[in-house]
Image (cartoon, helix red, strand yellow):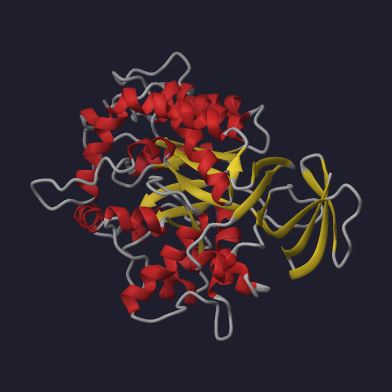
């Protein structure tokens, strides 16, 4: 199979009249400045597919359900109570149906791999299913049915607060001890064995949900896979961590957990001017989820300080309240602009494109965080690519990095087609199974919400 593009973002920069040949699920050959051959599919602008490093797929189903003001100041913590009530109702089949909608929307927006930070493990009464990885199997099935690549990150969650506090009733479906978590990881590996391109990692939920002893016990289960953890998302979390340990969450992890390039600290929103450079030097990825962080009122990541120290970042859709690769990148930059009252704050330097800088960081940092080699349109790479509609008004007269700037900041998401592992999944902006996925989703959500 061969595709021809009028322009493409290759590892060494933009090129024109590019022909990309697939050999099964990988790119066999990339030719520049060539005419299309007979039988080639012709498209506009080619980009590598982006990694989405942080998703809670089931939360797509509760988008909009927590937007009513309560009797006190609303925050992440009041939103969490709505989430607990929603999750109480989900069956494994419901989980799969919601995940399929979320993964379909990710593909339609330009994501081709997702890191599923998966913590809904048990039955409605908190008892494990006969297969402790039952819920993970349905996540894997959703990835298979939509075609998105999956890095599954089963979550270790044991406590309701710092210092090993007893879990609450609302958390009963999440809870494991180190022994049962080891079994969960073993069974999750079996679940992923037949899923093309799948990777397995682990995710201690947060320092408030695990003790130091438990963290030490579970880290070896990651082997060579990624390790993800929520860190410093809310100010209350930071204050509670200081009260428990005398240190802030990122500071504690850097001092006690051996954080390195295998790790992704999700959010890392509330860091001091010392913590940011220290995290950068560890070579871990900061997993940023700007749409969710804005929706929950978390705060703004200290990006200039972190990036100046060489920090690595990627993006994720987290609660999936709104799914869009360009929207995540735009919100990341706009948050910094609102705070600092400046423009082009996350560009790599004078004369550099902000859109290109955002895109390149999301590509490399997301790949590192999800345990894969950096994606790119080159021979030998997985055939995961996205085409933009060059006839969209946003691209009129644009070339090179101006294409990315217009895609991200032009207010539109003109995705034309998406291929994953050489398989066409999205055509004219629509997933091949959109009609069936949406129909099932609507049927399930009516029963859950009513």
Q: Is residue 322 left or right of residue 377?
A: left
Q: Is residue 174 above or below residue 123?
A: below
The outermost residue toward the right is: 38
Q: Nearer the viewer, residue 50 or 216?
A: 50
Q: Quadrant of the N terminus?
A: top right
Percent position of residue 52, x then y: 52, 50
| In front of the other: 6 or 55 | 6
Residue extending farthest to the bottom is: 350
Is the C terminus in the top left, top right, bottom left or bottom right quadrant? top left
Looking at the image, which residue is at 50% across and 46% down?
227
- Camera sees residue 128: yes
Closer to us: 326 or 127: 326
Task: Return the x and y of residue 425 as percentages of the image width and height.
Answer: 65, 40
Q: From where the camera sits, is residue 182 visible?
A: no
Write the residue at 60% across / 53% down: 415
Horizontally, residue 415 falls left or right of residue 33, namely: left
| Quarter assignment of residue 423 | top right
**Residue 293, horizontal then vertical, whole percent:** 34, 56
Q: Nearer the viewer, residue 446 or 149?
A: 446
Left or right side of 359 for 37 = right
Q: Residue at x 51, y 30 (%)?
A: 437
Which residue is found at the position 65% from the left and 62% from the top? Answer: 391
- Furthest toward the top, the residue is 130
């Amino acid at each position: 199979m061969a595709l021809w593009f009028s322009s493409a973002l290759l590892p060494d920069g933009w090129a024109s009249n590019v022909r990309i040949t697939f050999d099964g699920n990988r790119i066999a050959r990339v030719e520049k400045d060539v005419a299309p051959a007979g039988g080639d599919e012709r498209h506009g602008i080619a980009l590598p597919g982006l990694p989405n490093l942080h998703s809670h797929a089931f939360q797509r189903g509760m988008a909009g359900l927590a937007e009513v003001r309560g009797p006190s100041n609303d925050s992440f913590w009041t939103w969490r109570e709505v989430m607990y009530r929603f999750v109480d109702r989900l069956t494994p089949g419901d989980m799969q149906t919601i995940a399929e909608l979320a993964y379909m929307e990710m593909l339609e927006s330009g994501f081709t791999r997702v890191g599923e930070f998966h913590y809904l493990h048990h039955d409605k009464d908190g008892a494990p299913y006969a297969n402790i990885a039952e819920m993970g199997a349905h996540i894997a099935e959703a990835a298979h049915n939509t075609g998105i690549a999956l890095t599954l990150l089963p979550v270790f969650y044991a406590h309701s607060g710092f210092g090993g506090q007893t879990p609450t009733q609302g958390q009963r479906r999440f809870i494991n001890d180190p022994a049962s978590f080891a079994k969960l990881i073993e069974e999750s590996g079996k679940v992923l064995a037949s899923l093309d391109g799948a990777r397995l990692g682990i995710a201690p939920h947060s320092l408030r949900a695990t003790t130091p002893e438990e963290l030490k016990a579970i880290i070896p289960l990651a082997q060579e896979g990624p390790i993800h953890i929520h860190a410093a998302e809310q100010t209350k979390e930071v204050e509670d961590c200081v009260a428990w340990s005398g240190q802030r969450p990122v500071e504690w992890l850097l001092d006690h957990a051996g954080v390195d390039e295998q790790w992704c600290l999700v959010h890392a929103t509330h860091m001091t001017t010392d913590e940011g450079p220290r995290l950068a030097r560890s070579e871990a990825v900061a997993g940023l989820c700007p749409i969710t962080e804005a929706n929950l009122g978390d705060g703004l990541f200290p990006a200039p300080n972190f990036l100046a120290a060489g920090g690595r970042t990627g993006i994720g859709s987290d609660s999936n309240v709104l799914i869009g690769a360009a929207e995540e990148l735009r919100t990341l930059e706009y948050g910094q602009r609102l705070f600092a009252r400046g423009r082009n704050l996350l560009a790599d330097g004078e004369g550099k494109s902000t859109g290109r800088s955002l895109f390149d960081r999301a590509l490399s940092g997301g790949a590192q965080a999800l345990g894969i080699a950096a994606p790119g349109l080159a021979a030998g790479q997985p055939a995961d690519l996205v085409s933009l509609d060059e006839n969209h008004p946003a691209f009129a007269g644009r070339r090179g990095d101006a294409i990315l700037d217009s895609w991200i900041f032009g207010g539109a998401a003109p995705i034309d087609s998406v291929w994953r592992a050489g398989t066409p999944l999205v055509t004219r902006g629509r997933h091949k199974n959109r009609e069936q996925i949406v129909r099932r989703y609507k049927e399930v959500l009516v029963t859950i919400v009513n």
